Image (cartoon, rainbow, N blue to C red):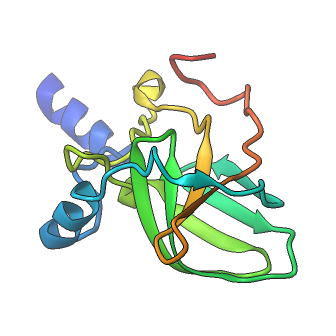
Amino acid sequence: MTIAASLTALSALTGCRGTAATTPEYRYELASIPYPKSAKAAPDVDIVAARQGENLRLVNRTPWEYTDIEVWINQQYVYRIDKIDIGSDNLIPLSEAINEFEIPFPLGTFLRPEKGFPVVLTELYDPKTQLKYRLNTPPVRDEPGIFW
């Protein structure tokens, strides 16, 4: 087996992949949503947004469910979510959060962990009320990345 074939097989085993599992039309739709920088800031909500590998887990500690809402990650990547249930069973695949250039959230790989970005700021935006809610996003210092 040649070195190139070995590296190709190794990259297939380590989770290297191309674009996210969304359709091109949906990626374009997400990319066309501008960040709501002029939206009125609502009081912070008691929802914890913690990165767990390739997912973002939302732990809703409020007595309310949130429906038809946009999740903004680091003010650049957006993901539409139909419903945020009460509790901790709210997982967002980070590979499906898209920025304005139709690029998914950088996750890094086994051999290139420095290519992944940390989740520093997470916000909810409700297009119906035009309010923006900041979530509790604790830093995770044991994840490899270029910022730690």
Look at 61% across and 39% down and name the residue there: 121
Instruction: State the quadrant of the C terminus.
Output: top right
Quarter-of-image position of residue 11:
top left
Front residue (pair 104, 142): 104
Image position of 46 (left or right of 14): right
Say above or below: 48 vs 100: below
Q: Nearer the viewer, residue 107 or 1?
A: 107
Q: How many labels, in total?
A: 0
Residue shown at 14% from the left, 71% from the top: 25
Q: Quadrant of residue 32?
A: bottom left
Residue under the image location 56 percent in, 56 percent down: 55
> What percent of the width, then of the height, locates residue 58?
69, 63
x and y percent of residue 86 in the render?
A: 79, 80
Where residue 146 appears, as percent x and y from the top left, is: 51, 17
Would residue 1 appear left or right of 77 to someone viewing this image? left
Looking at the image, residue 44 sits to the left or right of residue 103; the answer is: right
> In which quadrant is the N terminus drawn?
top left
Residue 17: percent from the left, percent from the top?
27, 49
Q: Is residue 139 left or right of residue 14?
A: right
Whether residue 111 can be seen here: no
Residue drawn at x 31%, y 38% is 10
Q: Is residue 11 above or below residue 132?
A: above
> Is residue 129 visible in the rendered structure shown here?
yes
**Observer-nearest of 69 and 146:** 69
